[in-house]
Image: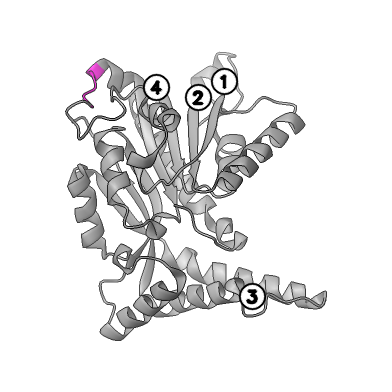
Amino acid sequence: MDKDEPATAKSVDAIPASTAADSATHDQHEKQRQRHVKLVDVGIGCGDQTLYLTRKLSRPASTPARELGGNSDDNPLFDSYIGITIAETQADFARERLLKTTLADDHPSPVPDVKIFAADAADPLSWGSDLTQAVLENSSSTPGEEKTEFAQTSPAKDEEHQTWLLALDTLYHFKPSRKSLLKFARQDMRASFMAFDLLMSDRASLRDRLILRSMCLVTGIPYSNFMTRKEYEDMLVEAGYERDMVDMRDISEHVFAGIARDIWKKDEVMKIYGMSMGMGKFRGAAKVFNWWARSGVVRGFVVVARRGNS
């Protein structure tokens, strides 16, 4: 489920995106072997992060390849990409942007296999057969079956294929919660998980919680999605991830204040031309981000949960 957000919020996505991309290739560098890496990206909106991840982000070719005179071009961080957005119009626009970028570029796309789907990412059981088949491919899972008995993968297949679920600044919007997607990702897709998500501070006072609840009523965000760090980690464990394979990093100081400043600056520029964002969603969003930055009630975390060998 996607959010209707100011475009300026996407300017900070390079931070979690780069961290997530590094995580996705961690095991590859560790074992020094080539795997087929698939990225399933939820909440892509109109495709800003899709363009960044599939067209701009890459890793340098290995040093041995350069020394031996091999191909020194940068390599994609993953081999296939599946993007999911809730609105068909957004999916169409994202596909159109990808096509225009491809046609305008003299070089082929770093990621050879890119697919965009319109679906409610919060409810995997509602997905169409094409999307379900695409995300379960190489996972030894069968569309329509339940739980994890069917999702057993041979060690050889685990060595050859790796799937990551990516969610940048979107999961807190999911209705009724993130749990269905995370359970499906771990048990059916057999995927590792990486995200930039919003959590509630452990030190949030009753007053802070009441203010946050009021904001949720206005924005339509489920208040129950704002968990503490411990509650979030417990949710991942409940979905099937091992606690010692979960890494959570607070990057709030690099995010909220910068977004608020970016929105206010854009408003000042628009005023020069006789326009203003007024009291609409953009200025409202700036005030929310500014309050989060000052109060510390809501924290921005990069979350990585590796699937492990089970």
Q: Where does the C terminus fall, quadrant-wise? A: top left
Query: Which of disc 4 and disc 1 is earlier in sequence?
Result: 4
Number of marks present in the image shown:
4
> Closer to us: mark 2 or mark 4?
4
Residue 111's image quarter?
top right
Q: Which residue is mark 2?
A: 62
Q: Label for residue 215?
A: none
Q: Which residue is mark 3?
A: 264
Distance Cα–Cα, label 1 vs label 4: 20 Å
Q: Decide: marks 2, 1 in contact (CB < 8 A)? A: yes
How crowded is the residue under tag 3: few (<14 C-alpha within 10 Å), some, or many (20+)? some
Question: In the rendered image, which residue does mark 4 sit on?
Answer: 35
Sequence-first disc among 1 and 3: 1
> How far apart, in angstroms, are the residues tagged by discs 2 and 1?
7 Å
- CA gap, disc 3 and disc 2: 43 Å
Give the x, y percent position of residue 9: 56, 61
Q: Amino acid at mark 3?
A: Trp
Label 4's element? loop
Task: Work out whether 74 lies above or below 5.
Answer: above
Amino acid found under the numbered disc labelled 4: Arg
Q: Position of residue 131 (x, y in %)?
A: 43, 32
Q: Position of residue 116 (x, y in %)?
A: 54, 36
Residue 276 magenta-highlighted: no
Residue type, mark 2 in image: Ser
The residue shown at (62%, 37%) is 95
